[in-house]
Image (spheres, helix red, strand yellow):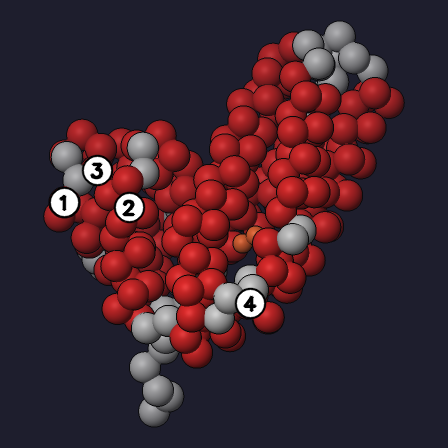
Amino acid sequence: MPDAARLRPLDPPHKGLRNALGVLSLQAGRTEFSDPVAVADLQATAAGVWALLRDHARLEDEFIFARLERAVPGASAPAAEQHPELDATVDELEEMLAGFDGTQSNDEGHRFVLALVDFQARYLAHLVLEETVIEPLLLEHVTDEEFAADQQAVLEGADPATLMLWFRYIVPARRPADTRPIMANFVANAPPPAVEAVRSMLAEVLDEPTFRAVFAED
Ligand SMILES: [Fe+2]
Ligand SMILES: [Fe+2]
């Protein structure tokens, strides 16, 4: 029997972000850039992804890396040093896409698609660096109780719209058994309308057996 799994603080956000970036680049690649409705739809998806990327950088700085820095000063630097350049690219992508209104050619749209997948490639490598270099140090120096306390503080401090976005991309990207306790906690503590909103959003992005497994209804 394997040892009880440690909590991996980067596992939920990173799986969610990989899912979100995949969804966004897939949608960008099939967008007709001369169609205002399709472009607005792409802008709406992208707005959620930029929000999650920014929220994740903040959570790493305020919670995840902060824990490690208290134990081993400087240990998070290899990843933290990449943040300003990645943040700047998010700003550039946002600005480029905001300049589109559905009257562009697909060649112009292709510039955005290329810039997006170039960012995606760099960001995926950043996530791997964090999970191979930083997370092992975190597991060495931070206890599961401290991770759980941070997770609780993040859940309680999150605004409902951002929490909804995280659920949208994280839940389909993880094993249902990993999500189940988090969802049970959310269902027990969140206001019923918020729970209902998350349930109906997840019903759109999960197949039925997964939905039932996540909400312990199987
Ligand atoms: Fe990061
Ligand atoms: Fe990260």
* Neighbourhood count class around disc 4 (C-alpha, 10 Å): few under 14, some 14–19, many 20 upward: some
Say if residue 180 shows up in the picture: no
Verify CB contact (< 8 Å) between mark 1 and mark 4: no
x and y percentages locating residue 135 in the rendered image: 50, 69
Q: Disc 3 versus disc 1: distance between alpha carbons?
A: 9 Å
- Establish whether ligand 2 lies closer than 8 Å to the Cβ of label 3: no
Mark pair 3, 2: CA separation = 13 Å
Task: Examine the image and state in which quarter residue 156 appears.
Answer: top left
Say if mark 3 contacts mark 2, CB within 8 Å. no
- Quarter holding the N terminus is bottom left
* Res 144 quadrant in image: bottom left
Distance, label 1 to label 4, CA atoms, is 35 Å
Q: Nearer the viewer, mark 1 or mark 4?
A: 4
Residue 155, numbered label: 2
Q: Is mark 1 within 8 Å of ligand 2?
A: no
- Give the Cα distance between marks 4 and 2: 26 Å
Q: Amino acid at mark 4?
A: Ala
Residue at mark 1: 189
Q: Which comes before the other along the chain, label 4 or label 2?
A: 4
**Which numbered disc, 2 or 1, marks the residue that appears first in the sequence?**
2
Residue 62: x and y, percent?
41, 49
Write the residue at 35% across / 30% down.
Answer: 161
- The residue that label 3 is drawn on is 195
Residue type for callout 1? Asn
Task: Please tell me which of labels 3 and 1 falls first in the chain.
Answer: 1
Residue holding disc 4: 75
